[in-house]
Image: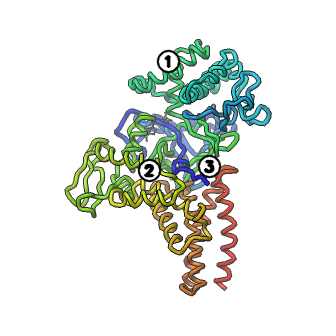
């Protein structure tokens, strides 16, 4: 069995602005009411000047446009339902089907497009073959005319092959100009951050070489200026969502959801449909009328230095949200180190909004530069990346090795604990029914550690909370039942513990039931539902 990496639970989108002064929540923007959204709203919403939409568009000098709740929103409320504006293979995708983005191989028996010769999953069953939002006939003609499939076959390296796939989404965007002017206009309204990106030679020159020159010189798109193609590259970098399920991985642009501002403790989550990739944005926490509606563009279970660096490099703004401003990250200590000097204190950033400010122990005089701290964390991260994520021994060895270096809630420790709380109970040699009392306690404690952090960083109805609560229910239930059978606890204690299990399962099911059909999370929601039914019967027996 292969475990998903922690990052699977954090698919995001993009954003930017080269400004490090304002925070999402503290920004006093001007509201532009009734602009509403384009594609996602129903016709009646549009006729009614979007008065029915749960949001309005506001503007601030720091963030540009962003969305604000136009009424009180409850956890689970659908805020945006967006169809794709356009979609294409993910940036580092290997060889994938141009219709549905599932992996294909370059082999003589691989199905090929009858027009342009590109490898596909199937010419009869692929959901995106010859479709407007897949491998369209306009795309097929252009690729055929310029014999791009031949170039793909001649590729000498994986890098070159990936670069060819990377050009598909920009191509699809550019084709919209002549084939779909309405959608083109929506695309052109998106932020590209050209001014900022132009000043980053590594980024600009790479796009010039990999995308602009290839599209103009090899794929015959001379009708577009270099600047126009760079703009499309920027729009994709800043506004794309990573989508897809199981093996299929893609990136897509959406007509309304791109307006969501970033926050490192978001109040929404999103899912995309496995076939159409329609995007649903839902509230995870209550969002009072007038509050900013936010999404995270970064991994929530990463430390502040890394999140801010990622947002600055990829989305071109320095995040100054409440979490980034707080060195303890809402008392989770997600970036904290254990003090090597006094061994009791916690080492934290002295000024979290300054990437270069020193880090200091709260209990003694120990100080370390941000640079040394980064080198240390990068080294530990590299080591963690090299571990077998399916090995309990390797992950526990890692936790043990860095017990005196990382705070128990450091994001690298939490990442290892998250993998472990899934391995205990499912993996060969650690199946749930075979776990010893000690192993059950260990699983419970990993789950509780992770949940206590996630409760603060992705509160409410977040997918990550749903998964962990499901994992946590089993060890509590098995231990309680075994202890009751062995007469170690009485019926009242059993009832108390089973009530905790009941609430965990109920919340977990409510969160995961909205996940797309066929996803592991939805399977978990079903399992939670059945477990709840059985549990209710047990509780009724105890209560008699
Ligand atoms: C996808 S766009 C969002 C819509 C954009 N504000 C607009 O007007 O088109 C992402 C950009 O919004 C801005 N942005 C989003 N969240 C922000 C935040 N928390 N702080 C500063 N800028 C933010 C950045 O400029 C970012 O590159």
Question: Which image quarter: residue 184?
Answer: top right
Mark 1 and 2 residues: CB-CB less than 8 Å, in contact? no
Q: Which mark is residue 524?
A: none
**Picture residue at 67% right of the left edge, 57% below the top:** 523
Question: Which image quarter: residue 143?
Answer: top right
Here the colouring is rainbow
Q: Earlier in the sequence, mark 1 or mark 2?
A: 1
Q: Badge 2, how many Cα within 10 Å: few under 14, some, many 20+?
A: some
Mark 1 lies within 8 Å of ligand 1 (Cβ measured):
no
Q: Earlier in the sequence, mark 1 or mark 3?
A: 3
> In the rendered view, does 230 fall on the left or right side of 115?
left
Q: Which residue is mark 3?
A: 78
* Distance of label 1 from label 3 (alpha carbons): 37 Å
Looking at the image, is mark 1 or mark 2 nearer the viewer?
2
Residue sitting nearer the eye, 292 or 217: 217
Q: Quadrant of the C terminus?
A: bottom right
Whole-percent x and y of residue 56? 54, 41
Q: Badge 3, how many Cα within 10 Å: few under 14, some, many 20+?
A: some
Q: Quadrant of the N terminus?
A: bottom right
- SS category of the residue bearing label 2: helix
Whole-percent x and y of residue 410? 39, 55
- SS category of the residue bearing label 1: helix
Q: Which mark is residue 384?
A: 2
> In the rendered view, does 110 fall on the left or right side of 182?
right
Q: Earlier in the sequence, mark 3 or mark 2?
A: 3
Q: Which residue is mark 1?
A: 227
Residue 365 in the image: above or below residue 481 = above
- SS category of the residue bearing label 3: strand
Residue 133 visible to the viewer: no
> In the rendered view, does 13 fall on the left or right side of 273?
left
Whole-percent x and y of residue 18? 38, 33
């Amino acid at each position: 069995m292969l475990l998903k990496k922690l990052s699977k639970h954090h698919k995001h989108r993009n954003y930017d602005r080269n400004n490090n002064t304002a925070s999402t929540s503290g920004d006093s923007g001007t509201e532009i009411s009734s602009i509403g959204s384009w594609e996602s709203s129903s016709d009646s919403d549009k006729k009614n000047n979007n008065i029915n939409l749960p949001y309005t568009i506001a503007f601030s000098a720091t963030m540009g446009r962003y969305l604000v709740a136009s009424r009180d929103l409850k956890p689970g409320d659908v805020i945006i339902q967006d169809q794709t504006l356009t979609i294409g293979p993910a940036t580092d995708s290997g060889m994938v089907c141009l219709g549905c983005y599932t992996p294909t191989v370059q082999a003589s028996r691989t199905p090929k497009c009858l027009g342009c010769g590109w490898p596909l999953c199937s010419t009869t069953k692929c959901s995106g073959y010859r479709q407007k939002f897949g491998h369209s006939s306009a795309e097929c003609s252009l690729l055929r005319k310029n014999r791009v499939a031949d170039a793909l076959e001649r590729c000498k390296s994986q890098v070159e092959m990936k670069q060819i796939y990377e050009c598909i989404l920009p191509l699809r965007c550019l084709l919209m100009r002549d084939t779909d002017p309405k959608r083109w206009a929506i695309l052109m309204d998106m932020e590209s951050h050209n001014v900022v990106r132009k000043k980053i030679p590594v980024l600009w020159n790479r796009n010039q070489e990999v995308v602009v020159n290839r599209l103009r010189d090899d794929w015959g798109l001379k009708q577009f200026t270099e600047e126009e193609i760079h703009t499309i590259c920027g729009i994709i970098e800043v506004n794309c969502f990573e989508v897809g399920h199981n093996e299929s991985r893609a990136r897509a642009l959406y007509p309304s959801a791109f307006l969501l501002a970033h926050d490192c403790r978001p109040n929404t989550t999103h899912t995309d449909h496995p076939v159409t990739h329609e995007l649903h944005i839902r509230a995870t926490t209550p969002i009072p009328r007038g509050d900013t509606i936010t999404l995270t563009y970064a991994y929530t279970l990463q430390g502040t230095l890394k999140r801010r660096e990622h947002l600055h490099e990829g989305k071109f703004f320095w995040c100054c949200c409440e979490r980034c401003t707080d060195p303890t990250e809402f008392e989770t200590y997600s970036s904290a180190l254990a003090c090597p000097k006094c061994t009791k204190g916690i080492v934290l950033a002295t000024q979290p909004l300054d990437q270069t400010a020193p880090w200091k122990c709260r209990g003694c005089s120990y100080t370390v530069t941000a640079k040394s701290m980064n080198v240390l964390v990068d080294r530990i991260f590299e080591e963690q990346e090299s571990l077998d994520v399916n090995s309990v021994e390797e992950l526990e060895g890692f936790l043990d090795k860095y017990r005196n270096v990382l705070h128990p809630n450091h994001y690298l420790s939490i990442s290892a604990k998250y993998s472990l709380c899934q391995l205990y109970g499912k993996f060969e040699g650690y199946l749930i029914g075979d776990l010893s009392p000690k192993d059950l306690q260990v699983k419970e404690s990993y789950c509780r550690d992770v949940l206590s952090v996630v409760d603060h960083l992705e509160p409410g109805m977040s997918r990550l909370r749903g998964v962990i609560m499901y994992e946590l229910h089993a060890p509590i239930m098995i231990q309680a039942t075994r202890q009751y059978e062995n007469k170690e606890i009485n019926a009242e204690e059993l009832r108390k513990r089973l009530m905790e299990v009941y609430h965990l399962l109920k919340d977990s099911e409510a969160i995961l039931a909205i996940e797309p059909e066929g996803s592991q999370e939805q399977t978990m929601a079903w399992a939670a539902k059945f477990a709840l039914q059985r549990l209710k019967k047990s509780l009724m027996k105890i209560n008699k």
